[in-house]
Amino acid sequence: MKRNGLVRSFVALAAVAVIAGACGGGGATTAPTTAPESTAPESTAPETQPPATTWKIGYSNAGGVGNGFREEQVCTAKAEALASGQVSELTVIHQNADAAGQLQQIRDLIAKDVDAIVFNPNDPAALNQALEEAKAAGIITVSVDAYVTNPDTYNLYNNQVEYAYLGAKWLFEQMGGTGNVYYMRGFAGHPADSDRHIGFQRALGEYPNITVLPTIDGVHTGWDPATTTQLISDWLSSGQYDNTQGIWTSGMDSQVVDAIKSAGKEFVPIVGADLGAFVTQLLDPTGFPGLEGAAVTNTAAVGGAGVNLALKLLNGEAVQTDPSASQPNTVLLVPVVAENVTDAGKTLLASWQSVPGLDPNWPLGLQIGGWTTYTPEQAITCKGPND
């Protein structure tokens, strides 16, 4: 069911999104939570019809298949579609592809006559032609985890510039403002990786005595565990690790810790994401003696939040967006950093470990206050309305 004129006439409110536990100054916190209280502002636009199980939604994830973040992201999308009671059919295309391949994924979803398409973009601009085709067909489009430049697509993602800045600043301070940092990035060309590079460089500008290795541009892991393990193993065997005082990772973190431990080397401070395995390592001084590290939240619940946003738009609800974002129609989620070198930091890390049965490679933040309605158990079950 498409309502081209009404949906396309929607105008977002020019205000910063406010969600439970917001840190202020730019959006909603992504601190992991299993019992969020939504303080998202109520819609000021009247619903044009009661919510009903009539919408068909497509979901495209064209990278990181097998990566805990991407797997959880897809599962939260399924869980939100089911929990909403408003989605009759969710079509998920979860296959690794380049930008051209994802362009075809979106066109395949258009051909299925869906009402909205939620997707994690491989490129900020390369998908625009298909997104324009979706608009012409009266289909809502929502980009999650990163932005696209298409002006009619809504973006909902973690503030990746701030994500990198917070982690890098903590690392550089932990190193005393001097030394060598091994810089391990994500997927080359992905908007999130590009934004994180900006944040990393911003922090680097504040600490001129930090040297980035192997080059200022770092190395790309592709957010792939096997590639990450190979890179850190090569770094260790080359002897260069012995002259490294810190490691910044783009969420591929527990593999780095395991490799250093296996090599019998002493740990240097490490920054990673709020993945279950890494947080467990940070809180295990017996198994990983001397490990100092910080986890920065990067909730994979953007998958579920993206479905929620699509449903709001389909139902004619008003959505508050962030006027400070680089692209229009953008909701930014604010990251939180927690470390294991203070009692307060360890308490925060421990508070995130509250969901039994969670895959250790999944981020711990399964919900986003005001943007998801499923339970943690539903996310773990990974079932959609037509599964």
Image (tube, rainbow, N blue to C red):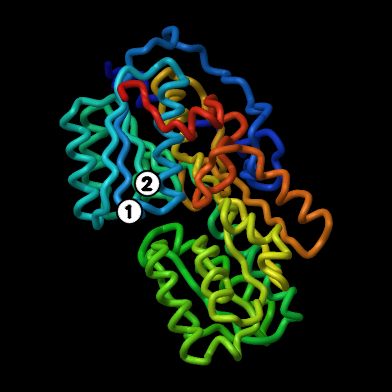
Q: Quadrant of the N terminus?
A: top left
Q: Mark 2 vs mark 1: which is more N-terminal?
A: 1
Q: Which mark is residue 11?
A: none
Residue at far top of view: 50
What is the distance, in whole Å, between disc 2 and disc 1 at their CAs? 8 Å
266 w.r.t. 202: above or below: below
Image quadrant where one finds the C terminus: top left
The x and y percentages for residue 143 are 39, 42
- State the residue at coordinates (51%, 39%): 301
Q: Of tags 2 and 1, which is closer to the observer?
A: 1
Residue drawn where x is 55% and y is 83% of the image? 212
Residue 295's image quarter? Answer: bottom right
Q: Residue at x 62, y 66 (%)?
A: 271
Give the SS element for disc 1.
loop
Residue identified by numbered label 2 = 120
Q: Is residue 339 left or right of residue 256?
A: right
Could you tell me the amino acid type at mark 2? Asn
The answer to whether residue 110 is left or right of residue 218 is left
Amino acid found under the numbered disc labelled 1: Gly
Badge 1 crowding class, 10 Å Cα cut-off, few under 14, some 14 to 19, many 20 or more, is many
Residue 327 position (above or below residue 98): above
Up/down of 206 relative to 323, above or below:
below
Kindly indicate whether the residue at mark 1 contacts the one at mark 2 (C-beta within 8 angstroms): yes
Tell me which residue sits at (68%, 80%) in the image.
207
Residue identified by numbered label 1: 63
The percent position of residue 122, horizontal first and vertical second, equals 32, 54
Residue 91 place in picture, x, y as percent: 27, 30
Crowdedness near tag 2: few (<14), some (14–19) or many (≥20) residues, C-alpha within 10 Å:
many
From the viewer's side, name the closer residue of 80 and 268: 268
| Circle 2: element type | strand
